[in-house]
Image (cartoon, helix red, strand yellow):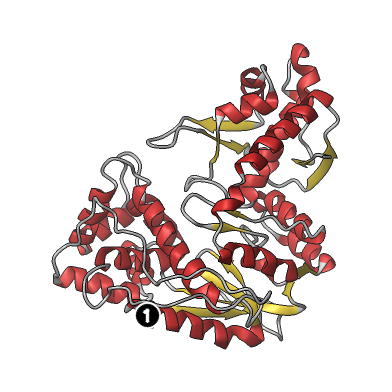
Amino acid sequence: MRYTFDLPASFDPTEFLPGRLMLQADAARWLMSTILRKTANRDTDVWGLVRLDSRILRRVMGRESSAIIRALKCGAIESAPHCANVKTKGYRLQKRYLGDRCVRMPCVDPHLLARLDAERRRLDAQDTRSCWLPIHHALDAEQRALSIDAPAADAILAGLPAHTRLCQDVLVGDLRRRDFRFSVGSTGRVFNALTGLKRELREAVRLASEPMGSVDIACAQPGLLALEMTRGLPPNGPKGRATYKVHRSGAASAPAPCASPAPASAGLPPAPSPALDSFASLVLSGALYEVLAERTGLSRDLVKHRFLVDVLAKRGRYPSRVEDVFRREFPEVYRFVRRVNRRDHGELIRRLQGLESWLVVEQVAPLLVGRVPCITLHDAIYSGRSALDTVEEAFEEVFDAIGFRLTLKREAADPAQGQWPRGL
């Protein structure tokens, strides 16, 4: 198999490798390309770090893997140690490269090629697709209806902030070459050709030759937190649904009872209270971020980010205006979050991602496959603009089935201006 690296245009391994490692330039390129591709596809933790298993690094990069990494840490990459329950180190590219365009370079080192082939055979033997549900195979096929207007994408890329350009160029290049990658993460999250693609660039993407629109959950993470806290309590108990819909191929998928994953063992639901009722009311109406923004004096976008990092997955002890306001306004919810995360700050985030995947991928998407072209993107489903009513109806059907109704928002490119509106 021929291997090609995706690299920042200004990256030169000889800038970092000492003389004795000059023959390992392709191994350095492989590491840079791996970090870049995973970053572009949002296969990172909440701090933007790509987690890589040291055993795989040694198998692919060879005996000098540690020395190569140390050399690249002198200006090409940075790393972070493993954290609780995550035994792999985190890596990311230095900021100097983020404004570059992406270049592709073939691997020519025969020793590295042999190790890459061996690793590919090892992965193929594990058959990671064997754990896919029928809906995953269907969604993998659905994304092949995607295409991109290359001249429009180039113009949009040129106008993006410099720190986003490199990763976006990688994703645009994949769409141009029709290289449709698909994977399922440990929490059930699906990674596909749209994952990581910025809102501006989606203007240039077509699904089955039609401009796209989306239906997604407003205030998704807080809404899922409310669902996590109340599952099993009437009237939120899941109700049965017999099967998935029939796929376009004509083959019916496996039965999918509408039962969610087990609640987090560490977090018993708090007793009803005015503060808890206020939290539920705000998240189910999609207004929580606006309220936190008003009470902290911060922008909504910053509040949304800080809520994720400082409340749902806080690591360490540092001051946070968003956390202080949330703890004061919703003390029962804050204590629930801290109980779930008492041993691992990432536990609740993983639970919410699993719940999100169960809801969108396993429950809503099967109602659409075979009826309208659709692509999932975490808490959203993309389709052609003409099919958004159908997508919204599928969400509503699932909400009726689980007895828990979240607020939806719809977005579509403005046909007159060719721009996406700013959503909630």
Look at the image and tell me whether residue 123 can be seen: yes
Describe the element under mark 1 as helix, strand or loop.
Answer: helix
Rendered residue at 57%/65% (across/down)? 134
Q: Position of residue 141 (x, y in %)?
A: 69, 66
Quadrant housing residue 32 = top right
Rendered residue at 47%/62% (across/down)? 357
Using a 10 Å C-alpha cutoff, classify the residue at mark 1 as few (fewer than 14 neighbours), some (14 to 19) or many (20 or more).
some
Quadrant housing residue 110 = top right
On screen, 22 above or below 366? above
Name the image quarter holding the N terminus.
top right
In the rendered structure, which amino acid carries the disc numbered 1? Answer: Ala
Q: Position of residue 74 (x, y in %)?
A: 63, 24
On screen, 50 above or below 74? below
Q: Position of residue 16 (x, y in %)?
A: 72, 23
Quadrant housing residue 82 = top left
Residue found at the very far top of the displayed protein: 20
Rendered residue at 67%/46% (across/down)? 37
Of the pair 163 and 227, the residue shown nearer to us: 227
On screen, 160 above or below 409? above
- How many discs appear? 1
Q: Is residue 17 left or right of residue 91?
A: right
Give the labeled residue for mark 1. 401
Rendered residue at 56%/27% (across/down)? 54
Q: Position of residue 339 (x, y in %)?
A: 23, 49
On screen, 293 above or below 286? above
Look at the image and tell me whether residue 32 can be seen: no
Of the pair 279 and 304, the residue shown nearer to us: 279
